[in-house]
Image: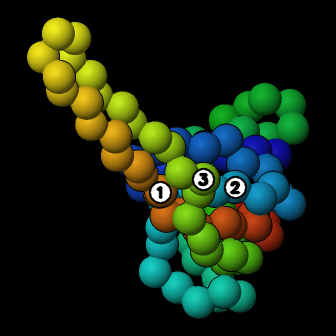
Amino acid sequence: MHAIVETGGKQYRVAAGDVIRVEKLVGEIGSEVELPVKAAFGDGGELVSGVSVKATVVGADRADKILVFKFKRKKQYKKTIGHRQSFTALKVSEILA
């Protein structure tokens, strides 16, 4: 069984035991969160209703740095900035139907 969950404005396809990286969530490592379900599918591919997905917070960190370089030719304009996105790692413990 797998489900489509939405958090942080993005949707993820998850199954029991998966570890996913989502936008930063409030919570301690080891705490349990419930994710909102958009759709859930059984083993045969049929749509299942009334499903809840429980996940455990296994870590929180920041991703690798992404460099953004802005440049305009012939104008002597160059600008370099970096960005590190915060994330929370979740392990999907169970999908309850």
Percent x, y for residue 20?
Answer: 69, 55
* Residue 20, label in figure: 2
- Say what amino acid the circle numbered 3 marks: Asp
Helix, strand or loop under label 2 = strand
Instruction: Please tell me in which quadrant of the rendered image residue 34 appears.
Output: bottom right
Q: Which residue is mark 1?
A: 85
Residue closer to the observer: 66 or 2: 66
Whether residue 30 sits left or right of residue 26 in the image: it is: right
Mark 3 → mark 2, Cα distance in angstroms: 16 Å
In contact (CB < 8 Å): disc 2 and disc 1 = no
Name the image quarter holding the C terminus. Answer: bottom right
| Disc 3 packing (10 Å; few <14; some 14–19; many ≥20) | few
Amino acid tagged 1: Gln
Q: Nearer the viewer, residue 1 or 8?
A: 8
- Residue at image position (75%, 64%) is 92
Whole-number angstrom distance, CA of label 2 to CA of label 1 = 15 Å
Q: Residue at x 72, y 48 (%)?
A: 14
Q: Which residue is mark 3?
A: 64
Going from N to C along the chain, the mark reached first, 2 or 1, is 2
